[in-house]
Amino acid sequence: MKYDDPLLREQLAGEYALGSLHGAARARFERLMADDPALRRLVVEYQEDLTPLSLSAPDVIPPSRLRAALEQATKPTTRADTAPQKWWQHLGFWRSLATANGLIAAALIAVVAVGVLPQEDAESELVYVGVLSDAQSKPGVAVMAYNRPNRLEIAAKTPLPAESGKELRLWIRDRDTDQPVFLAAIPADQTTFEIPDGPWKLLRRAKALIVSLNDMSEAQTAPGSQVLYEGVCVNLKKWSETP
Amino acid sequence: MTSRSIASQDQTQLATLIGRCALRDQKAFLSLYDATSAKLFGVVLRIVNREHWAEEVVQDVYLKVWNAADSYNASRGQPMTWLINIARNRAIDFLRSAEHAAAQRSDLLDETLPSALDPLKTTETGSEMERLRRCLEELNESQRLCILKIYHHGYTPTEVSRNDNRPIGTVKTWVRRGLEQIRKCMRR
């Protein structure tokens, strides 16, 4: 089969979204999707088209024992994890992450180890964390934003590309418009760098963060075709204040 | 929680909860469960048709969400779309598992589609639903019902063909052309 045939791609994407692809055909299509971001986008478009069918169909309340079982299954491994305030400031919490996501756990343990994470009386706070995945949906970069002074730390599983005449750029995806907005250029060979007030305030509007590779001459208007990583951005401070 | 409250819920809030799940925040995970479980349980129950099976599948779905939350990003669609599709795929896999021999499954097939699942027979509002309803109106009834049965109940084209006593080629054509028409219409 010629999977580069646009008509076939459309047909398979639609059938996958509908749920009529089964067995070996579905497994083959999922393998194909894993390495083909354009095909994944096509599937998402079909899924978005059909989702109103699920949203409009009647809800059914599940038995309460299901929630209890899930609560038990996802129970934090240390008592400190349940602290309602500053839960991310406990080293044990991040250690418990290691099995699930080595990258962010390692990044944050490293941050704690060098004393960047605030202690009770420390001035600086970790305010935002982003876990960014590559085109194959594999987590590859953690972005941490600290205040006082406002700065970003980038932790990457594998070294970020460095090409002559090109630079790495960090963008937010605006939570209201869904559009990327330029935040900062990532300095070569620097994992931590300060950012001015303007970009810092922009972080409040971020529902996601994006890392792209661009020609230095390219206008800072859109990430363009070379998006390396994207992932959800969480405002820790805001959520730590949630009752 | 009603379907409308999920439909109109701030998707950014759901995305944030998923993001916090990636950070192993159990409180966020349970909030996500509270906000979405009635919808996902309904979706799964329509496919597997037995409450105890639906319970098993939905438990798997939320554990998958908990463990794969770091792979969610905006390129995977709206958070609710992502969750619904994890649930539908898992429910369909469950149906096709060894536990469900074809004979047993055929006993569960409904000849008719409940009117609550046919947008042309409901009064559900919302701009996306309105657009989809208009597009579904453009299909003939057999084509529309075939697509709705596959979507809501996880039937295969072969099962629809047997159930409706139609040639399999006809059913496959309904699906292919129906999806093409919906896509074109939704993008007008």
Image (cartoon, coloured by chain):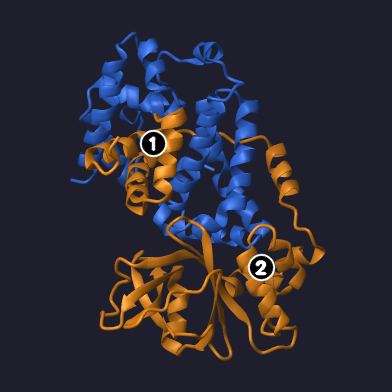
Toward the left, the furthest residue is B188
Is residue B10 at least partly visible in the picture? no
Relative placement, left or right, of B133 versus A77 is left
Tags 2 and 1 in contact by the CB under 8 Å rule?
Answer: no
Q: Quadrant of the C terminus of chain A?
A: bottom right
Provide the letter of the chain coloured blue: B
At horizontal 60% and vertical 37% (from top left) the residue drawn is: B58
Tag count: 2
- The quadrant holding residue A202 is bottom left
- The quadrant holding residue A196 is bottom left
Residue flagged by tag 1: what amino acid is it? Tyr
Q: Quadrant of the N terminus of chain A?
A: top left
Relative placement, left or right, of B6 versus B115 is right
Q: Position of residue B4 (x, y in %)?
A: 44, 44
Instruction: Determine crowd level at label 2: few under 14, some 14-19, many 20+ residues with C-alpha closer than 10 A.
Output: many
Discs 2, 1: same chain: yes
Toward the right, the furthest residue is A79
Provide the letter of the chain coloured orange: A
At horizontal 40% and vertical 83% (from top left) the residue drawn is: A185
Q: Position of residue A206 (x, y in %)?
A: 45, 71
Label 1 belongs to which residue?
A16
Chain for numbered disc 1: A
Relative placement, left or right, of A79 versus B164 is right
Label 2 belongs to which residue?
A105
Q: Position of residue A214 (x, y in %)?
A: 32, 76
